[in-house]
């Protein structure tokens, strides 16, 4: 009996020790995978928060189809705050993931960091500094957290402007440079990533580097279109030109796709032609219901709607010529000549004359309108593609006139416009088709919280059509659920992408929401 008593006492002591050790383990050791254990020792002077409102808003993005919770959000006020955070993760045995969040306008959780830290880049914006224009150098140095609209406002004060844009300007410099930044100017000036002269980047090791095509050039090209994988961009130097004053903005409607693309391709082959070129598709799903429908005079809505009804799919070519005092007398003549040379349906030409700012900021009106109706913060199952020129007619038959008409669910703008490959640079990370000319095709859908999956299903159908047809189509603003998808996405450039990841972010800390290396 005595020995049993002794044994149970030993057991009791052992169990007590075990409980104490278990309780103390997460506090006293560094091996827990939860970042908060490491971070709680340094709250970055109150800039690191786990408040549910911050964590909740970092979990969602413009897409509203994912909800990916970080453990904490850092609101940095200096580059050092970000460097310290990255170093903390890099130096730890159990590093935690972290993602820069620009304006959260991704559509599929690309700026998220599951159980890690989201770095809210917008908290870096300081109205007194952060944008410095050099008139003589014709460039602007801008903190990556600034929105393009803010950059434009500043540079216009000095009569200057960046030359390559996105359609919507409430996106951060860091966010669009991580993707590409495309719009109707890309055919002429290249994407935004082709208009950067220099950057400051904090790598996944917590090292700060200034890079350009001559200094640390591998890092420079890696970061451009690098989907946030190689470093957090804190400053970019963007090329500027003298800003024009106004924009002649013309739209032409087509019923024949080959006439439409032939005209588009001819216009983008000219170096001294239009300053902006895009195109869109209008499908027989009711009246033109996209953001830009306000473009057409209300008196013509019925006429256009009946043309859409009759032909089921029609196309709209959109071009702009900028002008100022020196060219105001010739611009009308030039645009008249241009319209005569086009094969649109006569009688369906529309013209506007707006300020340069109003043209670049054209999507804002639509945004405010949708916001006022509660239709902005809704799911956006978007699909953006680059389609090689040789495949665009097959795409029209199979997708616009096939899948889209058959399913009859598409709403919102469908963009289609060509760009020239020689305005891109193969050393940049962005993946693009091999052909000299390729098209950007964007299905910019808005959906309900209860039906967005049907749109997503259609996206998958479109992707499958392209894959089955071996069409060489590449996603822009890509989303792939598996690494095989990413290997196919980058094709021959996958090896260099991986090599660069090991070089600049060997612990795979950065931008886990892209789902490439996790
Ligand atoms: P976020 O969504 O916050 O981040 C995007 C990615 O970049 C994430 O992986 C993030 O981790 C990373 N990142 C963000 N900041 C940094 C940084 N400083 N350093 C390193 N990585 C960083 N795109 C076009 O090209 N053309 C268009 O015309 C266009 N129009 C759009 C219109 C609307 C209404 C919306 C919502 C999006 C549009 N986009 C367009 C897409 C847009 O360019 C991308 O979604 C872009 O990523 C959004 O920028 P953001 O600042 O919100 O970045």
Image: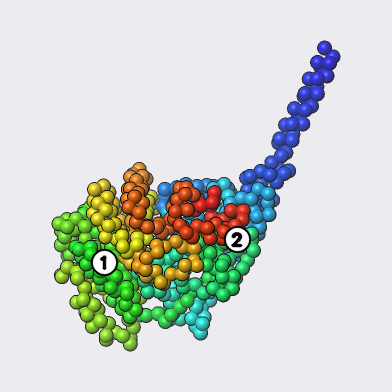
Q: Is residue 415 left or right of residue 503?
A: left
Which residue in the protein does label 1 denote? 261
Q: Observer-nearest residue: 19 or 414?
A: 414
Tell me the quarter of the picture where residue 166 sits. Answer: bottom left
Point 47% across, 53% down: residue? 487
Q: Is residue 462 visible in this depiction of the protein?
A: no
Q: Is residue 136 visible?
A: yes
Q: Is residue 69 left or right of residue 167?
A: right
Q: Nearer the viewer, residue 335 or 13?
A: 335
Q: Residues within 10 Å of mark 1 (few under 14, many from 20)?
A: many
Say which mark, if any, is on residue 44: none
Q: Quadrant of the N terminus?
A: top right
- Closer to the camera in the image, 198 or 386: 386
- Secondary structure state at the residue bearing disc 2: helix
Of labels 2 and 1, earlier in sequence is 1
Q: Which mark is residue 504?
A: 2
Q: Dot 2, crowdedness within 10 Å: few (<14), some or many (≥20)?
A: many
Q: Position of residue 53 (x, y in %)?
A: 52, 49
Residue at 25% in and 81% down: 334
Q: Residue furthest top?
A: 1
- Identify the element where label 1 is drawn: helix
The answer to whether 243 is drawn above or below residue 379 in the figure is: below
């Amino acid at each position: 009996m005595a020995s049993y008593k002794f044994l149970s006492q030993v057991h009791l002591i052992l169990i007590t020790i075990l409980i104490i050790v278990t309780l103390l383990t997460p506090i006293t050791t560094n091996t827990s995978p939860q970042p908060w254990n490491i971070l709680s020792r340094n709250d970055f002077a109150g800039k690191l928060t786990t408040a549910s409102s911050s964590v909740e808003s970092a979990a969602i993005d413009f897409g509203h189809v994912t909800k990916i919770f970080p453990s904490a959000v850092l609101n940095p006020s200096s580059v050092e705050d970000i460097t310290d955070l990255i170093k903390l993760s890099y130096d730890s045995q159990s590093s935690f993931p972290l993602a820069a969040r620009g304006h959260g306008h991704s559509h599929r959780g690309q700026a998220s960091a599951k159980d890690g830290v989201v770095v809210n880049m917008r908290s870096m914006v300081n109205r007194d500094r952060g944008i410095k224009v050099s008139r003589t150098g014709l460039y602007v140095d801008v903190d990556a957290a600034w929105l393009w609209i803010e950059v434009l406002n500043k540079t216009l004060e000095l009569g200057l402007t960046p030359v390559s844009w996105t359609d919507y300007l409430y996106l951060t410099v860091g966010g669009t440079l991580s993707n590409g930044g495309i719009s109707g100017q890309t055919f002429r000036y290249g994407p935004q990533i082709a208009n950067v002269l220099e950057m400051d980047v904090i790598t996944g090791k917590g090292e700060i580097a200034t890079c350009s095509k001559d200094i640390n050039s591998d890092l420079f090209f890696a970061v451009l279109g690098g989907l946030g994988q190689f470093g957090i961009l804190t400053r970019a130097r963007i090329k500027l030109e003298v800003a024009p004053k106004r924009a002649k903005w013309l739209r032409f409607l087509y019923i024949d796709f080959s006439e439409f693309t032939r005209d588009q391709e001819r216009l983008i082959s000219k170096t001294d032609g239009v300053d902006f070129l895009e195109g869109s598709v209008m499908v027989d799903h009711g009246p033109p219901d996209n953001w830009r429908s306000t473009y057409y005079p209300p008196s013509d809505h019925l006429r256009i709607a009946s043309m859409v009804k009759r032909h089921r799919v029609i196309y709209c070519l959109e071009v702009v010529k900028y002008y100022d005092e020196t060219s105001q007398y010739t611009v009308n003549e030039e645009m008249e000549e241009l319209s005569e040379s086009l094969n649109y349906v006569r009688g369906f030409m529309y013209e506007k004359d707006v300020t340069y700012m109003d043209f670049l900021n054209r999507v804002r009106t639509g945004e405010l309108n949708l916001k006022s109706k509660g239709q902005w913060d809704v799911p956006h199952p978007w699909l953006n593609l680059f389609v090689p020129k040789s495949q665009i007619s097959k795409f029209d038959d199979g997708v616009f006139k096939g899948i889209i008409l058959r399913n009859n669910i598409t709403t919102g703008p469908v963009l289609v416009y060509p760009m020239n490959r020689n305005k891109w640079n193969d050393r940049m990370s962005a993946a693009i088709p091999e052909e000299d000319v390729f098209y950007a095709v964007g299905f910019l859908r808005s959906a309900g919280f209860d039906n967005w999956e049907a749109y997503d299903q259609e996206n998958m159908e479109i992707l499958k059509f392209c894959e089955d047809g071996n069409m060489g189509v590449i996603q822009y603003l890509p989303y792939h659920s598996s690494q095989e998808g990413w290997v196919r996405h980058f094709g021959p450039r996958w090896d260099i992408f991986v090599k660069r990841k090991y070089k600049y972010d060997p612990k795979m800390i950065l931008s886990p929401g892209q789902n490439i290396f996790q």
